[in-house]
Image (cartoon, grey):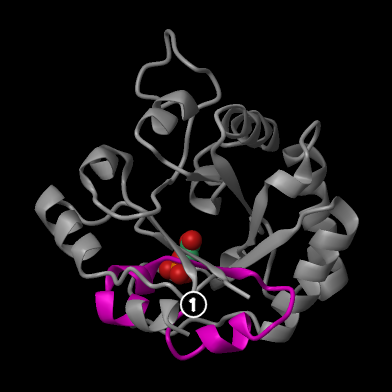
Amino acid sequence: MKKLIIANWKLNPTTLKDAQKLAASIERAKKNTVVLCPPTVYLSQIDYPNLGAQDCFWAEKGPHTGQTSAAQLKDLKVKYCLVGHSEKREVGDTDEMVNAKVKACLENKIIPVLCIGFGTTVEQDDLEVTDVLKQQLDIDLAGVDASEVVVAYEPVWAISSGDPYATKKIATPDHAEKISIFIKSKFGVEKVLYGGSANPSNAKGFLDQQNVDGLLVGGASLIASQFNSIINI
Ligand code: PGA
């Protein structure tokens, strides 16, 4: 079964030349579906089979300075869009805003990759984690056909500092599997990814789980050798 591996470059790199160089060094892997999410400003200049955006705005056009709409992303042949990433929630995205963005993606035939896990803590047990996730998903998926949405479970405490070599406490594959089952069984979601310090050493453990359908990779996606080894698992 093909897994979905998404590279979230975040606010990297700082030049178009470096972005194109990085994209060119990522293999066109056949084993898994691979998506690159470069910064929006580079999207039209990156040549890769599957592209994703890191965020979008809910309105299609109009007086919304600084925003990028799902309609504009669709015009750039973007197939996926991250929505509700914890780094966006940290600067003000509410669940209601996330819900509007998910809907805008679907209206434009872009697959939303709904990130949840903001507000979870390393001390919480599985039940407490699912309580937090339920609160998010109840709003994020309101009025949405959940089977059309990819959910990325990213426990915020496991997300790396951006340094791909930094070691961070990360979730166990077993925890990711349990949470994936919860999300699928309670919300009708069909695809759940894990994200948070995924790297070549731990990726297989997650991908071996039956209900973990792929990975959302930040730091390790900026180093071609690391990302290439993940997408070839
Ligand atoms: P990380 O980022 O792999 O660097 O932890 C994942 C993410 O934030 O999407």
Q: Residue furthest left?
A: 17
**Image coordinates for residue 44, horizontal then vertical, percent:** 25, 38
Of residues 32 and 168, which is closer to you in this image? 32
**Residue 138 in the image: above or below residue 129:** above
- Check disc 1 and report its element: helix, strand or loop: loop
Q: Position of residue 11 (x, y in %)?
A: 31, 51
Magenta-tinted stretch: 199-227
Q: Is residue 226 magenta?
A: yes
Q: Residue at x 89, y 56 (%)?
A: 186
Residue sitting nearer the eye, 142 or 25: 25
The quarter holding residue 126 reads bottom right
- Give the vertical position of 204 relative to 137 (above or below): below
| Res 164 visible | no
Residue 129 in sight here: yes
Judge whether residue 118 is colored magenta.
Answer: no
Front-most of 76 and 202?
A: 76
**Residue sticking out furthest to the front:** 30
Asked whether mark 1 lies closer than 8 Å to ligand 1, one says yes
Relative to 40, 81 lies left or right: right
Which residue in the protein does label 1 denote? 198
Residue 169: which quarter of the image? Answer: bottom right
| CA neighbours of label 1 inside 10 A, class few (<14), some (14 to 19), many (20+) | many
* Residue 170 in picture, x, y percent from top left: 57, 81
Kind of residue at badge 1: Ala
User: At which x and y percent is residue 73?
Assistant: 41, 32
Which residue corresponds to the image point at 32% horizontal and 51% vertical from the top-left? 38
Residue at the spot 60% in from the left edge and 64% down from the top edge = 154
On the rendered structure, is 226 left or right of 58?
left
